[in-house]
Amino acid sequence: MPKRSGRAYIFMRWSASAVSPAGLGDIAWAFENIDRLGRFYCFHCGASEVNRSADPARSRSAWQAKCLTLPELMKAMSGQSDERAGYDEVKVFEVDDSDPETALQVAQRAGEGTGPHLDPLEEVREILTRYGVRGLASPRPFSAPFLWYNILPSRSVAIRKLPLHLLQLRGAGQRPPASIEEVEDEARAAARQISGVLGLGECLIARTRSEFIVNLRVGVAPQLSVAQGHAIAERVEEAVREANPKIRNVLARIYPEDESNAG
């Protein structure tokens, strides 16, 4: 079966939404539905937001839509209404082998409430991972949606600039290979988000063809047991691998960090 290239999108609303005035941003998703002959069919988009409501029946606000053109998608995501505030920025993910049918099934089950009850960020990650996006970090360590969005690979652009951004991506053909400096920045940023990490030491990176191996020293509280230190190291390794699909192997080496010097 031939591969179907496609694009997935993650949208960020920086301001509080109408249904969640205390929220620190909201996340929405979209992906291209490409048929088995490689022809564009439509965009599917949607979001699931947690409302700050005492009524459990109103604690979740979900919506989904189908857009036939890019202008329709931009209007759906940036248009203001009483029911849903517009989103501000977007990140685009190129997918070499997309699976829109599976992603749509997951999205529909989530929208109908028949699938597993996931956190909105976990839901976005699940849908787009099923579509074929790789390297989406787990949102569990992040206390707010914008923190997760910021660490995701890909460049963030204003929605009004999306057509130009897509044109630039098409002209580039593919994302240029990451530099060792970029990989180190991504690895350190992902490690810092893990609970229990008090500091970061030396970071050694080796390139193997188009992939990378990361060796990172991670400071933890000296009173932790060996098992607790290993658990933190494993979470760091998982987060770093998910931060960039080009990172093949990660070794987190634990060392005791003086908490008074942690920053």
Image (spheres, rainbow, N blue to C red):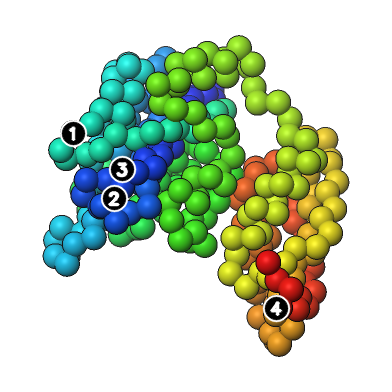
- Amino acid carrying label 4: it is Glu
Q: Which residue is drawn at 60% across and 12% down?
A: 171
Residues packed near mark 3 inside 10 Å, few (<14), some (14 to 19) or many (20 plus): many
As displayed, is residue 24 above or below residue 171?
A: below
Left or right of residue 236, residue 70 in this image: left
- The residue tagged 3 is 47
Image quarter of residue 258: bottom right
How far apart are the alpha carbons under marks 4 and 3?
A: 40 Å
The residue mark sitting in front, 4 or 3, is 4
- Amino acid carrying label 1: it is Ser
Q: Residue at x 59, y 60 (%)?
A: 193
Callout 3 touching callout 1 (CB < 8 Å)? no
Counting residues from the start of the chain, the first of labels 4 and 2 encountered is 2
- Amino acid carrying label 3: it is Ala
Which element carries disc 1, helix, strand or loop? loop
Q: Residue 146 at x, y = what percent?
A: 46, 48
Q: Residue at x 39, y 42 (%)?
A: 14
Residue 99 seen by the camera:
no
- The residue tagged 2 is 49
The residue mark sitting in front, 4 or 1, is 4
Counting residues from the start of the chain, the first of labels 4 and 1 encountered is 1
- The residue tagged 4 is 259
Residue 201 seen by the camera:
yes
Callout 3 touching callout 2 (CB < 8 Å)? yes
As displayed, is residue 259 above or below residue 34?
A: below
